Amino acid sequence: MDSGETIKDAGLKVTPQRKAVFEAMTQLCHATADDVVTMLHRNGNDMTVSTVYRVLDSFCKTGILSQVSHPETGRCYYDINAREHSHLFSGKQIIDYDDEELTEMVRKYLKGKEDIPGKINRVQIQIILNEV
């Protein structure tokens, strides 16, 4: 996935900062803003924390990234996989879990329920695993 193309296709201007953050996220997959800053600094890029947050926020707003909150730590992670999918949590590890059948089953179950005040936009299931 070419960083410049992805950024441009999302309607954003391609800048060195956006390219660097996108490329870091393609390597990290699930990362906090601090994780991204650490990787950038290790690679010799002295981008500020506020710039990283602004870039990550613009990526989420345009659908390049999604966000997931870790159920045990409460920390916000950015996810390079912006498609509708679920997550498995094993300790600090976050694993993408794609199961269209499960997602559709949840949609069908909730469709038409009286206590659901609107149309379902996105199904994101979080499954917490016991550590072995």
Image: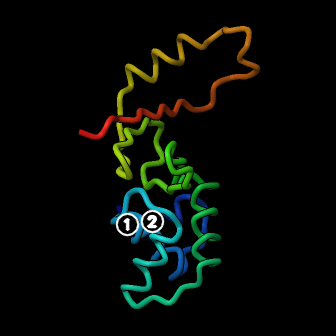
User: Which residue is farthest right?
Assistant: 117
Measuring 40% from the left and 71% from the top, which residue is drawn there? Answer: 24
Q: Which residue type does callout 2 highlight?
A: Glu
50 over 25 or under it: above or below: below
Q: Residues within 10 Å of mark 2 (few under 14, many from 20)?
A: few
Q: Amino acid at mark 1?
A: Asp
Q: Give the residue number, with chain letter if any, for mark 1.
A: 2
What residue occupies the far left of the structure in this picture?
132
Mark number for residue 5? 2
Q: Quadrant of residue 122?
A: top right
SS of the residue under disc 2: helix
Locate residue 78 relative to residue 39 in the image: left or right. right
- Quadrant occupied by the C terminus: top left
x%, y% of residue 94?
A: 38, 48
- Quadrant for the N terminus in the image: bottom left
| Residue drawn at 56 percent across, 55 percent down | 76
Alpha carbons under labels 2 and 1: distance apart: 5 Å
Q: Residue at x 51, y 42 (%)?
A: 71
* Image side of residue 114 versus residue 109, left or right: right
Of 14 and 21, the residue lying toward us: 21
- Pointer 2 with pointer 1, Cβ within 8 A: yes
Task: Give me the residue at 32% from left, 35% from top.
Answer: 130
Q: Secondary structure at mark 1?
A: loop
